[in-house]
Amino acid sequence: MKRIILLTIGLSMVTSIMAQEKKLFTLDDLLPGGRTYYQHSVPEQVFYTWWGNQLVKQEVDAVKTVDGEVLFTLNDINRILSAAGERQINYLLTVEFPYPDQTIAAVSEGDQYMMVDWTTKSVVESLKFEKGTENKDFAANSRCMAYTKEHNLKVMKADGKVIAVSNDGSLDLVYGESVHRNEFGINQGTFWSPSGQLLAFYKMDQSMVTSYPQVDIYARTAQMIPDKYPMAGETSHKVYVGIFNLTTEKTIYLHTGDPTDRYFTNIAWSPDDKYIYMIELNRDQNHAQLVRYDAETGEKDAVLFDETNDKYVEPMHPIQFLPWDSNKFIYQTRKDGYLHIYLYDTTGRELKQLTKGEFEVINVLGFNTKDKTVIYTSNECNPLQQNSYAVDMKGKHTLLDEGSGWHTPQLSKSGGMLLDSWSSPEVCKKYDLRTIGKKISTRNLLTAAEPWDAYQVPEMKVGTIKAADGVTDLYYRLVLPTNFDPTKKYPAVVYVYGGPHAHNVDASRHWGVRGWDIWMAQKGYVMFSLDNRGSEHRGLAFEQATFRQLGVEEMKDQLKGVEFLKSLPYVDANRLGIHGWSFGGFMTTSLMTTYPDVFKVGVAGGPVIDWKYYEVMYGERYMDTPQTNPEGYKQTSLLNKAQNLKGKLLVIYGGNDPVCVPQHTLSFMRACIDADTYPDLFTYPGDEHNMMGTDRIHLHNKITQYFEDYLK
Amino acid sequence: MKRIILLTIGLSMVTSIMAQEKKLFTLDDLLPGGRTYYQHSVPEQVFYTWWGNQLVKQEVDAVKTVDGEVLFTLNDINRILSAAGERQINYLLTVEFPYPDQTIAAVSEGDQYMMVDWTTKSVVESLKFEKGTENKDFAANSRCMAYTKEHNLKVMKADGKVIAVSNDGSLDLVYGESVHRNEFGINQGTFWSPSGQLLAFYKMDQSMVTSYPQVDIYARTAQMIPDKYPMAGETSHKVYVGIFNLTTEKTIYLHTGDPTDRYFTNIAWSPDDKYIYMIELNRDQNHAQLVRYDAETGEKDAVLFDETNDKYVEPMHPIQFLPWDSNKFIYQTRKDGYLHIYLYDTTGRELKQLTKGEFEVINVLGFNTKDKTVIYTSNECNPLQQNSYAVDMKGKHTLLDEGSGWHTPQLSKSGGMLLDSWSSPEVCKKYDLRTIGKKISTRNLLTAAEPWDAYQVPEMKVGTIKAADGVTDLYYRLVLPTNFDPTKKYPAVVYVYGGPHAHNVDASRHWGVRGWDIWMAQKGYVMFSLDNRGSEHRGLAFEQATFRQLGVEEMKDQLKGVEFLKSLPYVDANRLGIHGWSFGGFMTTSLMTTYPDVFKVGVAGGPVIDWKYYEVMYGERYMDTPQTNPEGYKQTSLLNKAQNLKGKLLVIYGGNDPVCVPQHTLSFMRACIDADTYPDLFTYPGDEHNMMGTDRIHLHNKITQYFEDYLK
């Protein structure tokens, strides 16, 4: 099924015939933040969640079974809350079901967390938090809520009693929050043990880290907001892992040794609460160890295994124990070149590589306890797709859907059912309930109507070209101008990202096209995106082709895309533009200054300009440090290429961008001024790395106008 | 002689005939910072200075009399220095003569200050300073140098001994530096008594002032540089005046009472060292007092007189004692509506108004001790001119030059001679030595050649139109496109400043035209500047028309200029642009958002956007405070007009502008984004309020390109 040629005609063959009757888009129709976006671009959405093994539908004023039977209404819940003297809630869309076997609904309102038994009509628990609490993390088994306030970690017990796990939290000393700048799959700072009696948590000392001076212009007189930001090669923070014991109310710390220049990632509990597993990585990111600690003493119990790579290893997934065998767990690694699932035992012995092949596991959903399988998604069907599979402990795997499109399923408690929410170029949006068994049975819950049916949708094509290495297939998406006339010559704009952990082209609705592509197509541009080497889901070699020289190989691939564009008879080779954000802003600026004769106009948003201004965790993984890779930093720094700028280049940044800090863009402006070249500039004061809401509309009007002014 | 109609044809009537043979300018030819600016735009410059009553010419390697006799050479001086074991100097252009009657030359090299007697061939004094010393101030009579280092004040005696006047200096507590943000004519922080035995100095406590967070992007990780910046209506600094006694090495402070919200300005010594005179002003700036303090005790001795105004008084000039009568002094004030010179005695009695009329004294040069006259410049001949006069104690005044042009003379020690450096629309640059007596005799030292003679210079016209009040004459300068064709239609660009203490049009060389005007004329634009009400040298009512509503009347006047422009048959009324910097950036942005249909394109540099972000001293003089004049602040805030923007507006700011802080421009961008309007933006990272050197060339290329893109 791999590498099928995808060259599909979009919806517009039909729509162009009826073009006169169909509407044109507004930018508000097409972009998140637009006033009419949800109405005109987003297919019907429904909210489902698993209550154990039962799928329930969350509506504003009722929760129903998939058969439409009402479990309870908003009025029911509010009557119960009211009788108990608790505050009312406004909707049931976000209700949760923490106990598979109990008729308990958990709801939040403001800083209050409440659990209601809709059978006994009683409020089971009501936790009231101070204002400004963050990172709430509920342990269903102990009914305790961990949370943070002003960088301190606290636990509220079921009876409302608050225990302060830490008291010395500050900007310098952070408890219970995500660490290592959310790299290595880290997105939280608290980890309840299975019983809910022990709370593992991160403590981060960043007193030694330089602060980036973000400026708040909304203050009466502008104010500096320091933001700890360790730049590549500079002093990094130190992380500790604590374990708080609910019974003793004492904290111990894992005996990791000196945490300087080490990453403590992917924390997992043993099923019996006795051990903590963690993947430890050196600052070079080329040597990882799976380590087990005694959760009572904090002593190191064992190093289960090592993983090394001459470029980098990137642990992203905590180990997961088999529900039916607490001596075995699965581990995900790219050690054979693709991300796959492996079965290990707790001695650290590899028992079996469960998935294998030139594809990548995208998401492990959980386990089917009856069949003893792991349920996951991968792009085995096609590099552009994400489909669901079950694999048993012998490595036999079964496709769980019909093998097309892009699926983002949720698994039931015991893994017997999937709520499969998916789309494909032909399917706008479907919610299918799939029962996993010898035969997969599918019940369609909703097939959404295509909101764009009322509009003139441009033609889209997807296909492959060869990368600059002459071997690798790269996927592109081409959007033709609305009401395309093949005898005309059109300007073309490349939208690029090009960095790791992302892609632009996939087999979801409209091939994952961006609203702005449609907008530009409507204005008469050919739009093109190509996922170059370095982007996600294509294996380790594909990604690591860029090692120590980010942008170099990526640009070569993008130039292959340009060659292809120029080969199209309807593309005006003299009117090529390029736009990208973040890594794509880096790519845009790199291309405009490395190959100054290719693109006439570029718009770079929130760009990296010099990797030395990017942070340690992400930056050093791909670039090593400025000290150990001076040539690579020099070669890729756009400060050294400012003098090459010939075309029109607009650089845009969020005034308080904490990701690609303003120093990138401002340093580039300075370099261009010194080199007597002439970029343009815009900023969104107060915004961070991305513009949201109406700012997003303003931004895309701004970007569009720039191409209209200089490319059309 | 007043209000003659000035409507003069520039050089180009001649030059256009020979246009083919003449060169076109490059931008580098026209602007300071350009590589060829000095060569191609600046008339020959010579350096003269007074040695008592003898005028000497400073050349690189010799100092000569005006008759060409060599006083000494660079080799002479270096031989003397070398013999004494002192360091060599590189040129004599900046040599000074501290003693009228001694053959002593003072020279500086690096952090060393040396005095050489070229007759005795000896080094009279050599002072070596630590690195980082600033604000050096030499007392010739005591041969001591006052200076500051890291906000502390020190004195180095002739023998090299250093006395620390202060030790607790810091960013919060500043000694010996200029205070009150250089308003009220203040530009230094130390004031030697006539004998050189007492040193008055400013001490400023600004610990209570909010810091503006300037960001240094050149640091490895960007760094905040706090800059104390009291914004209108906010807490201001407190100033003290100390007197350091060289003999006792003790400091006393003037007993001024609580310095909160008071300005201590225009410090002057009595000729006998016994008293300090100072003008004290309330924060409202509508009540000034001339106060005398005992310099030994610091006790307040007398309030000589008060001056009030219902809008504001602005003391700019310390009193000056008559050299022949130490009981009398002159005082400059606009109390009759124009800036004039008054004679007072030390009891505070006004003896005589020495100058009078609807003109303004521009600069008091000093005294002629033989004739007992005050020598000054004024625009009595014509509001566009500056000419030299002598006035005796009866108020009889005599013109000292031929009555045309713009003169910036320097007076000899006893006031008998003027080195008159001047230009006019007809005179490129002249150095005349004038001997003051019953008959003025003039000896021309140099008549510089016009460097623009080799170029195609556009035609320039100057004239008057009526202000929006229907009465007041306003002066404009019009620059026609190079190789002007009256049958064509040209786009026109207004260059505007419009604020107090400045003007654009005067009777100096080429009517004070800006190099960029010439550049734009060469590119085919009509260039226009008008000095609206509120600008300088036209009297108090003219200036105060703008009180509490900066921009409002100024804009009305500028619209009169636009009416005039539109009446010109060769101006395309649909292609009007505007550009200005600082107050002119405020005017540009104000006009673009208050009268959005007038200008198609604007470029605003370093603008004030809301006067609440401007500093206390200048801002509150014209606007009062946001608390006492909320309507005025609201009416003039461009944050409230962002939604009106229709034309193309590029706003440019220095990344570290300490005058119009970046908060202005950034807040305006935010307001426009929120209002869905579309300004453009550029910044010069690391630059302050004005772009200097090659940045200035880059800036004007950028500005020009914007008009070329959108107005042409």
Image (cartoon, coloured by chain):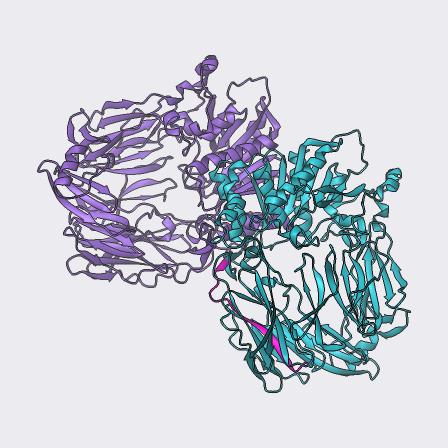
Chain colours: A purple, B cyan
Q: Quadrant of the N terminus of chain A?
A: top left
Numbered-mark total:
0
Residue ID at (40%, 31%): A383
Image position of A265 with respect to A91: above or below: below
Residue ID at (89%, 67%): B438
Determine the residue located farthest toward the top in the rendered image. Answer: A17
Image position of B324 with respect to A578: above or below: below
Query: Magenta residues?
Result: B196-212
Q: Quadrant of the C terminus of chain A?
A: top right
Image position of B596 with respect to A26: above or below: below
Residue B49 vs residue B328: left or right? Answer: right
Q: Nearer the viewer, residue A536 or A326?
A: A536
Q: Nearer the viewer, residue A288 or A525?
A: A525
Q: Nearer the viewer, residue B19 or A424?
A: B19
Quarter of image, res B394: bottom right
Q: Is residue B333 visible?
A: yes
- Location of residue A192 in the rendering, given as x and y in whole percent from the top left corner: 22, 50
- Location of residue B60 in the rendering, given as x and y in whole percent from the top left corner: 81, 67
Residue ID at (56%, 71%): B150
Residue B207, magenta (yes or no): yes
Q: Is residue A608 visible?
A: no
- Location of residue A482 in the rendering, given as x and y in whole percent from the top left corner: 50, 21
Residue A389 vs residue B304: left or right? Answer: left
Determine the residue located farthest toward the left in the rendered image. Answer: A120
Residue A86, magenta (yes or no): no
- Location of residue B287 in the rendering, given as x and y in whole percent from the top left corner: 57, 63
Residue A121 vs residue B462: left or right? Answer: left
Q: Nearer the viewer, residue A288 or A344?
A: A288
